[in-house]
Image (cartoon, rainbow, N blue to C red):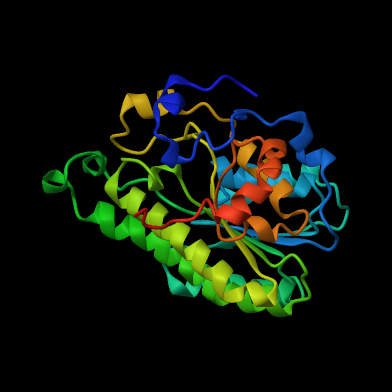
Amino acid sequence: MAEQPDFIRSLPPWAGTTFVSKLNHDIPTSLDPAKQSLPSPFVVVVTGSSRGIGRATAKSFAQAGATGLILTARTVEALQETKDSCKAVAKSSDLKITTLAADNAVESSALAVADAIKTEHNGRLDLLVNNAGILNVDETAFGNIIDMDPSNIEQTISVNYVGRFYMIKYLLPLLLNGGSTTKAIVNISSVVSQISGPLGFSISALATNRLSQRVAEAYADQGVVCYAVHPGAVKPEVPPPGMPPHFEEMAKESVGLCGSFLVWLVKEKREWLSGRYLDATWDVEELEKKREEIVEGDKLKMRLVV
């Protein structure tokens, strides 16, 4: 646990960052993936896993005992380092890793992932981590609307929202019918869904929150749980074009924090958090103590305050 940065303390309560008082900026001992255990078998899809949060998340699930990983990126070659690192730390000797080239904005990529699950993992899927996404296309994304290249809206929403919809649409049948009791979907979102930021990214994150809520509501009676998760502010390996210096200065979280939080989130069924916006920096013990408050107040969801 670390002291809250001035930026976090300055945000309004409805940004959600301080919903719990204790925030983690690195992996706490209690969330060490190697010390957590998943059910077995346990098959996970992690999109956008060639680097950064995606790679670290795949590694976390390997450490926690996943028996199957399906990893996607723009090229298969880009996934080799992720695959090797997952094999090196795998808790399960039966871990099978499938790597696929996929463009998250293209519908056929989601179909290819579904086919790979059927042919290489016996049709079993326990968890989809919808991580693939982009912050922006060029430096105009950080400016005003008049100066913004429209591609910063079109491509960002296509990858970050429509692409996640495709993955959910084509992988849900496998979650439902592949023998899983976990039946979980995690959509990687952002605190920028609640505050100002690059417009296309902000809109796509807010839409992701609503998508998560809709999936949770529509499939709860079939045992599906769906969460929108802010992974923390992580310094990118390759800064996007035009990123203001203060964005990097605010990036205080460990790249592995999100994955360790997700292992905790799905290692047992947490219906009481399904459909809600969560923050990987939140202390989970304090979060669990707020269970009654969250459920009775139906908190951490997107709605109009009147």
| Left or right of residue 227, residue 6 in this image | left
x and y percentages locating residue 155 in the rendered image: 32, 58
Q: Is the residue 89 above or below the residue 245 in the image?
A: below
| Left or right of residue 306, residue 101 in this image | right
| Left or right of residue 303, residue 51 in this image | right
Q: Residue most toward the left?
A: 146
Quadrant location of the N terminus in the rendered image: top right
Q: Residue most toward the right?
A: 93
Q: What's the residue at 88%, 53% (across, down)? A: 93
Quadrant location of the C terminus in the rendered image: bottom left
Q: Quadrant of residue 244?
A: top left
x and y percentages locating residue 165 in the rendered image: 47, 69
Q: Quadrant of residue 210?
A: bottom left
x and y percentages locating residue 21 in the rendered image: 59, 29
**Which one is in front, 263 or 82?**
263
**Which one is in front, 61 or 138?**
61
Q: How many marks?
A: 0
Query: Is residue 130 visible in this depiction of the protein?
Result: no
Q: What's the residue at 81%, 40% (across, down)? A: 34
Q: What's the residue at 64%, 28% (across, down)? A: 26
Q: Is the residue 46 above or below the residue 211 in the image?
A: above
x and y percentages locating residue 211 in the rendered image: 47, 65
Query: Is residue 234 visible in this depiction of the protein?
Result: yes
